[in-house]
Amino acid sequence: MADKIFRVNMSDLSTKVEAVPEGWMGLGGRGLTSTIVAAEVKPTCHPLGKNNKLIFAPGLLSGTSAANSGRLSCGAKSPLTGTIKEANAGGTSAQMLAKLGVKALIIEGKPADANKWYSLHVNEAGVTIKEETEVMGLGNFAVVEALNKRLGPKVGVISIGPAGEMTMLGANISIKDPDNHLRSCGRGGLGAVMGSKKIKFISVEPTDQKVAIADPEAFKIASRTFAKALIDNPISKALGQYGTNVLVNIINESGGLPTRNFTSGQFEGHEAISGETMYDTIVARGGKPKHNCHPGCVINCSQIYADVKGQYKTSGFEYESIWALGADCCVDNLDHIAEADNIMDDLGIDSIETAVAFGVAMEAGVLQFGDGAEVCRMLREEVGKGTPLGRIIGNGAGFVGKAFGVTRVPVVKNQAIPAYDPRAIKGIGITYATSTQGADHTMGYTIATNILGVGGKVDPLSKEGQVELSRNLQIATAAIDSTGMCLFIAFAALDDATCLPALIDLLNARFGIHLVANDVTNLGMTILKTERAFNLAAGFTNKDDRLPEFFSEEPIAPHNVVWDISDEAIDSFWNF
Amino acid sequence: MQLTVKLFAYFRDNRFKEKFADYPEGTTVEEIIRSLGIPLDEVGVTMINSRHCELQQIPAAGDQLAIFPNIGGG
């Protein structure tokens, strides 16, 4: 069955199934969401108004048997940054949508009646809009539970929690995973866009249909080579054991672990929140160190973190969330961090944005650094209930800084800077500054080369080579984000000569085309330029591609370094 | 010379987390790794005093040497 565009208009509550325009045929994931946003969304529109559109797109390989291909991209104009936005996550929906022949789901307009809420149900015939009352106000876990009962345990669920209903700028979009837990399209407030369109959830009907493969034999061979490259990679193995949180100790050792609202590069309590401690704790309590966020993942970087009684506490317990609540807020207690992580999953709010917002609130004296119990209380009682203070925190780090007059506010384009200090790891500073989506480490993960020795070595403290490193990685990432592949394939792709050719072979076998490596690079470049053009038309300039002032003025221990890459060098990023 | 050796991830298994140890003057990072029975091809990153270092580098007395296997995340 040919792929189609499923279009929903929330202004008149109509739906359509359309043929895929020629120009969108070779696109998927981020490449497609960004192309559609650029083509159909007025760059100057209000992100929470009727003129913004919310787009979902499985990757080019999603729904196939290729390993790690189950990521779902979600795009719109971001209410947090005002830029174009793509956030992707695992879970079961990408593969289900792809099997139903959904190339993209475009949601436009906004209901006239602000008091009514709706759900969307997707099956192969199209989309059905229904008024929703039962699950309104519920957290994401309860939504999944209710929908499993209503629609069967295999239904795919894409939902927002109370944060999205309240259109908080840190609200994310959750996707049900194979164990009825959640994965998040985390960054940029896309949950607020879904909330503005009055959609509480999208359910996806299970199907026995298969994605069409143009050359099944070639696909099978490429698939085997690709999976082997991932499985054999030593970093994949470490990810399976310790999760992404294995990074706490190495980033701390490098002096680049932002601590106490970005005032130091090392955290005294690092060992207590490290991947090593987390692994030992999970094993001792009978949790699961290894867990997949989507069927077909061979890396298994997720985990089930159990409480002292051995009961589920949280999963997908990531380095960035643990860093932000841990080092940045000085909470040296993994159980408090796990509880906060779980509450944020349930509320449907980004665990990076919100935790960094807490760090800024701590600096303002709203609560004390290190008070993990108070973080959990405030998440439940303030953010979850939408009190004025809760709304300030739920609107992100930049908003908290403004509300309380804090000048040390780690954001770029109003999006919180994640877990690597750009003064001590300069390549990532270029990514934060130039990313089309505000500060986001995943846009061009220079940590690989600056710190981990993957894809070569570039001294993290030197000014040399950082722009080129970030540029190459941002281009490659834009392409990977279009395939439906998890970004962690990059560790194998950067160092194993068999990996990238196998990925290209997979694309060629899936669609019966003849891409070469250059085509993939060109795709990445085109996506970045499309996104950049949208931002320029929305009013952004190169002056927005800058880090906050304090990074240039406050040296960070232990290396006592400042951000010292010139504006001209930053701007040269776009010379391609 | 006395220095602090720190191990991470599974390198800690049946070894240690952190140890203050004595090595002859001129001992290289590689020799220290070998003396710990860690296969060289499993070493991903080494740092002396929070700066990346080469295997042939010779730590000075009082240095902190950190040894990591191949790891990643993000």
Image (cartoon, helix red, strand yellow):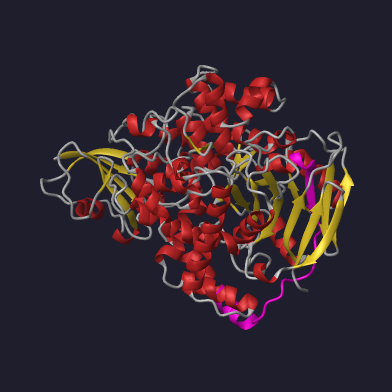
- Seen at 55% across and 38% down, the residue is A352
Name, please, the residue furthest toward the left.
B25
Q: Residue drawn 27% across and 51% down?
A: B36
For the residue pair A355 and A37, the one nearer the viewer reads as A37
Decide if residue A205 is on the left or right side of residue A459.
right
Q: Quadrant of the N terminus of chain A?
A: bottom right
Residue A233 lies in what quarter of the image? bottom left
The image shows residue A213, relative to residue A541, as above or below, that is: below
Task: Please say whether residue A308 is visible from this viewpoint.
Answer: no
The segment highlighted magenta reads A196-223
Residue at (53% x, 36% y) in the render: A414
* Residue A160 image offset from top left, x and y in percent: 73, 41
Is A171 in front, or is A287?
A171
The total of numbered circles placed on residues is: 0
Residue B31 at least partly seen: yes
Residue A201, picture quadrant: top right
Is residue B17 within the magenta segment?
Answer: no
Residue B74 x/y as whole percent: 48, 48
Q: Is residue A437 left or right of residue A165?
A: left
Residue A448 drawn above or below residue A339: below
Q: Is residue A328 left or right of residue A389?
A: left
- The x, y position of residue A255, in whole percent, is 33, 38
Quadrant of the snapshot with the C terminus of chain A: bottom left
Q: Nearer the viewer, residue A440 or A216?
A: A440
> Front-most of B1 and A524?
A524
How far from the left and from the top, in percent, is residue A27?
63, 66
